[in-house]
Image (tube, helix red, strand yellow):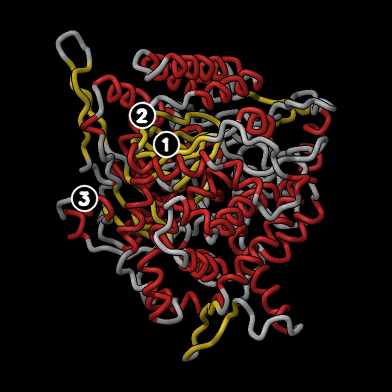
Amino acid sequence: MMLVGTTQSLSAAMTEDATNKGGDDAFAYTDISFADIQMLRYKVEGFEQLSLREKTFIYYLQEAAIMGRDILFDQNGCYNLRIRRMLETVYTSYAGDRSTEEFKNFTTYLRRVWFSSGIHHHYGCEKFVPGFSEEWLRGVLKELDYREPGMQENSSWESLMPVIFDPAVMPMRVNQRDGDDLVRTSAANYYGPDVTQAEAEQFYAERKATGDPRPVMNGMNSRLIRNEFGLLEERVWRVGGLYGTAIERIVEQLEQARHYACTPEQEVVIDRLIEFYRTGDLRTFDNYSIHWLRDTESRVDFVNGFTESYGDPLGMKASWESIVNFRDIEATKRTQKLSENAQWFEDHSPVDSRFKKEECRGISAKVVTAAMLGGDLYPSTAIGINLPNSDWVRREYGSKSVTIGNLTHAYAQASHGSGMDREFVIDDATRTLIRQYGDICDDLHTDIHECLGHGSGKLLPGTDPDSLRSYGSTIEEARADLFGLYYLADPKLLELGLVPDKDAYCAQYYTYMMNGLLTQLVRITPGNTIEEAHMRNRALIARWVLEKATEEAAQGSKKVPAVELVKKKGKTYVRVNDYAALRTLFGRLLSEVQRIKSEGDYAAARALVENYGVQVDETVHREILQRYEQLHLSPYKGFINPVYKAERNADGEIIDVKLDYTESYDAQMLRYSRDYSTLPLMNY
C-alpha cells in the first residue's frame, strides 16, 4: 500500500471561502483545518453514469464500509471508544461559553481523535497532548453528570483521565524503538496487557507448519491474550467472537450487496468473505483472496476486512479497513500497459536472478475512482493498494493493484500554489521540471509501486514470510518504491507511451530525494525519531543514496556526487548533479533490498532501517520546521466522505442513489458515531 508522499500532501491551506466554489476544483478545497490536518473533499466522478444495479451495489457496500468504524478505534487502543463517547457527549451537550480557549482546544482534540481513530497520531503514533486542562474537563463532566453507558461505576470516567493527560501512560500507539519490548510499550490493542514480545513471537513460531508451501497468515485476525490458566490464546475477530456485533452488521450489508454483484465470480467473492467473517478460518480467507484476484471483470470492486499490519508492532495483526471503488476505464489503459508487460520488467530488474519470478502470474492493475473510504483508509487514506498480502497467494495466483485516481487528483489540486516548490526546490529550472512532469510521474510511480513493485520478486524456498519481523513493512515499501524509481527512468516507459519525455523521470527523482531528506521532516515532532513505515522507507532510500553518492565522489570515481545537500543563502537544498547515476544507485539498493526480502535476512534489514531510516538530524530538522512554518500549511490531509442517499419506491425498492457533498467534517463524524456505533465501549 502506498500512502501519499509529503510532496503531494503538503498542500496549500485554502480559505473557508474556497469551500463554496463551484466546479470540479471545489472538491480539492478544504472543509476545515485543525492542528496539523487539512480536510479535503473528493468527487466520485462518473457515479451518475453507472447503472442502477451498480449504484445499488455501491450503496450497500458503502454501508458495510462504515459499519466497521468502531473496530479500528478499538484496535488502536482499548480506551478509545470510551474516550470518543465521552468527548462527543461534552461536545454536543456543553452549555458553557464555546468561544473560550479551553473549549476551542477541546474541539481540536476531539477532531484529532476522530481523524486518528483514537488518542494517538495517525502517522507519528505519539499520544496527543490536550490543549485544555484536566480540571476543565472534570468540571464539565460533573456539570453534565456524565455516566458511561454500560459501565457499572457511576464515576468510571475517572479512569480515563490519566489515559488522556498523563504523558507516561500509553505514550505510543506503535513503538518501533530497537531494543524495547515492542508489545508491552505499544498501546495498540492487539495483545493482552501482560503479554510480552518474546511470548508473542514464540507463540506464533510454534504454530507455523514446518515446510508448508502455502502457510496461512497466523494471527492476522485475532487478539492474543492470557487466559484464566495463564496460557496464551487467541480471541478471534468473527461473528460470535471478538468484534462480533460489528461484524454481524457488516455481513448484513454484504448480504444485501450480493444481490447486485457485477458478475457470478463476484458473488462467490462475497460468499467467501462472509464465510470468513463467520468462521474466522484463515484458509477460508486465502480462498476468498484467490476468488477476489480472479474477479477482474467487475467494474465495481471493494476491499472490506482485516488487511494491513502497519498498526501491529510485530507486523502480523491486521487493522480493519474498507474501500469501495469502480474502474476509471480511460485511465486504466495506462496501468494495463504495465501489467501486460510485467514479465519484461521482472526479467530486466537489476536484482539477482535467483530472486526473480520465472513467471509473473495474475498481475492486474487499474485506476479506480474511490466511492467510499472506511476504517484504516478513512479519513487519511492510501493513494494506491496492492493485495493480497499472502506471499504464497501472490506467488501462485498474482496480485491486484489499484491507483486511486480521484484522490491523487484531489491531492494534486490542493497542492498547486502552496509555495512548497518555491521554498524547498533549489532553482527555477528544477521547479519548471516538476511543474511540467510532477503530477504525471507521481501517478506513474504509484502505478509501478503497486502493480509491479509489490508484485515483483520471490522468496527463496524455506524463507519465512515473517522473518523480517518489525522491519518487514519498511523493507517491503522500500522494495516497491525502488522498483518504481528505477523503472521511471527506463526507455521502456517512453516506448509504451507512458511518459511524454525521456527526462520526465527527473521530476520524481528530485521530489523523492527532497522528500526523504528534508520535507517529510515537517511531520516529525522535535526530539522524536521516525516511526511510521512509509516515512522510514523514504528516509532509508534517500539517505543511503546520498551516502553512497558522497562516497563515490570522495573515492574519485565521480567528479561530483550524483546528489548532495547544499547551502544556498543559509538554507539547505537537495542538488542533483547526475540523474542517470542516481538511477544506478536506486538499482543497487533495490538489488540489496530484494536480497534481504528473498533470503529473510533479519540482521541486514535491521541494520539498513536503523542506520538510515530512523534517526533525525536535529539541526536540519529545526531549519526545515522554521521554513515550513512560514508557509502556513498543514502537513497531513484527509477526506470527508460523500453521503449516499437511496431513493425508494412504495415497496422499499431502491430506484436511484444520489450523492450529497455538503456534509461537514464534524457532522459526518457525529452521524457515524450515532448511526454506526456497532461495538460495546469495552471489548474484552
The spot of residue 391 in percent (x, y) is: 68, 34
Tag 3 or tag 1, which sits nearer the N-term? 3
Relative to the observer, which residue lies in front, 287 or 670? Answer: 287
Residue 24 is marked as 3
Quadrant assignment, res 12: bottom left
Report if the CB atoms under discs 1 and 2 are less than 8 Å apart: yes
Amino acid of disc 2: Gln
The spot of residue 68 in percent (x, y) is: 45, 30
From this viewpoint, which residue is outermost toward the front?
A: 495
| Cα gap from disc 1 to disc 3, whole angstroms | 23 Å
Quarter of the picture holding the N terminus: top right
The spot of residue 316 in percent (x, y) is: 67, 38
Report if the CB atoms under discs 3 and 2 are less than 8 Å apart: no
Relative to the observer, which residue lies in front, 662 or 393? Answer: 393
Q: Secondary structure at mark 2?
A: helix
So how many labels did they put on this image?
3
From what the image shows, is residue 102 above or below residue 77?
A: below
Query: Residue 165, can we see it?
Result: no
Quarter of the picture holding the C terminus: top right
| Cα gap from disc 3 to disc 2, whole angstroms | 23 Å
Q: Secondary structure at mark 1?
A: strand
Residue 62 is marked as 2
Q: Residue at x 47, y 67 (%)?
A: 503
Residue 374 is marked as 1
Amino acid of disc 3: Asp
Amino acid of disc 1: Gly
Q: Residue at x 44, y 22 (%)?
A: 250
From what the image shows, is residue 524 above or below residue 378?
A: below
